Amino acid sequence: MTCSLSTCLRTFVAPLERLKLEYIVRGEQRNLFDLIKMIAASQGLKGFWKGNLINILRTAPFKAINFCVYDTYTKQLCKLTGNKETQNFERFIAGAAAGITATILCIPLDTIRTKIVAPGGEALGGIMGAFRHVIQTEGFLSLYKGLVPSIISIAPSAAVFYGVYDILKSTYLHSADGKKRLQYKNQWGEELNALGQLELGPLRTLLFGAISGACAEAATYPFEVTKRQLQMQSQANKLSAFATFVGIVEQGGLPALYAGLLPSLLQVLPSAAISYFVYEFMKIVLKVE
């Protein structure tokens, strides 16, 4: 279910992802509306979905692995610490560990996606052609370009994503309104449908998910820009993550580290909101604690 929804979501927001990469990878300077007109005029509507297939192949397992191992890590941390309820520091640690695990497993697909969307990507001959080209010309390990900034960013990103949501959820459930909702839920129990059993309710679950996703994206976006630039480098011009970061700032100043943030946030808001909604909903349907 999570994988299917991730596929639908990524396809729906693919134009925003394409716009973000235009700002990062090609150093686009146009405003958002002018950039949309340029892509539509030069490539037609299909240009907005360029690289979407590889993005789906990466995102669906990434989301599934992330949510699955997050629950596993939180339960193990509670056992180790002896806490009955998950504490904030355990949420942050589990979120960071879940993000790192998913990133290590999925980053080769992320690298290939960047190559396909970048200038000259059309000549690579699709996903398999891009894989062959990268491995033959740059070696297998080049598929892990950008792993360092990814790990540096995914740890705090996942920590913020899960941590902010759980803090918002905990704060609400300890409020007077939240206690009333829990009391009502416990009173009627199985007689309520799955939507009625959501602790936060549908709208609040969506809202808290969107807020947590936006916070995580904004907090770690400079690492995303650095990672994309690393993935674009040829073997001959390869720089370290730190040197790439410094180069971005030297060429474009601090604003360059946030190139494409607006379209990125616009795609993250619905994606994070619905991901958390489905996560909480399916836990009820499948009776997972």
Image: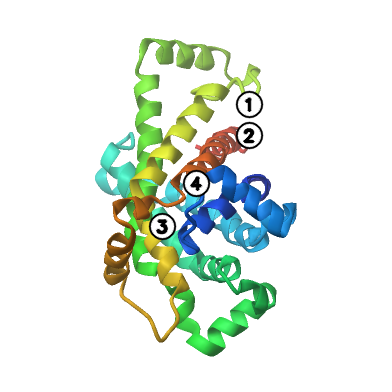
Give the CA separation, mark 3 to mark 1: 36 Å
Residue drawn at x 33%, y 58% is 252
Tell me the CA gap for discs 4 and 2.
31 Å
Q: Nearer the viewer, residue 216 or 115?
A: 115
Of callouts 4 and 1, the N-terminal one? 1
Task: Name the amino acid, label 1.
Answer: Ala
Q: Which residue is mark 3?
A: 224
Q: Could you tell which of marks 2 and 3 lies nearer the N-terminus?
A: 3
Please, is residue 176 above or below residue 2 in the view? above
Pinpoint residue 35: horizontal percent, then vertical percent: 58, 50
- Specify the amino acid type for callout 3: Glu
- Label 2, label 1: how far apart the Cα atoms are: 6 Å
Return the disc, 4 or 2, that comes first in the chain's sequence: 4
1 lies left or right of 112: right
Q: Amino acid at mark 4?
A: Ser
Between the residue at mark 4 and the residue at mark 3, the CA separation in whole angstroms equals: 11 Å
Q: Which residue is mark 2?
A: 285
Q: Amino acid at mark 2?
A: Val
Q: Which mark is residue 194?
A: 1
Residue at the spot x=38%, y=44% of the render?
Answer: 218
Mark 4 Cα within 10 Å, few/some/many (few <14, many 20+)? many
Residue 3 makes an appearance in the image = no
- Residue 178 lies left or right of residue 115; in this view the side is left
The residue labelled by disc 4 is 264
Give me the residue at 43% from left, 76% from top: 233
**Could you classify mark 2 by the number of other residues whose Cα lies within 10 Å: few (under 14), some (14-19), or many (20 or more)?**
few
Q: Is residue 157 left or right of residue 29?
A: left
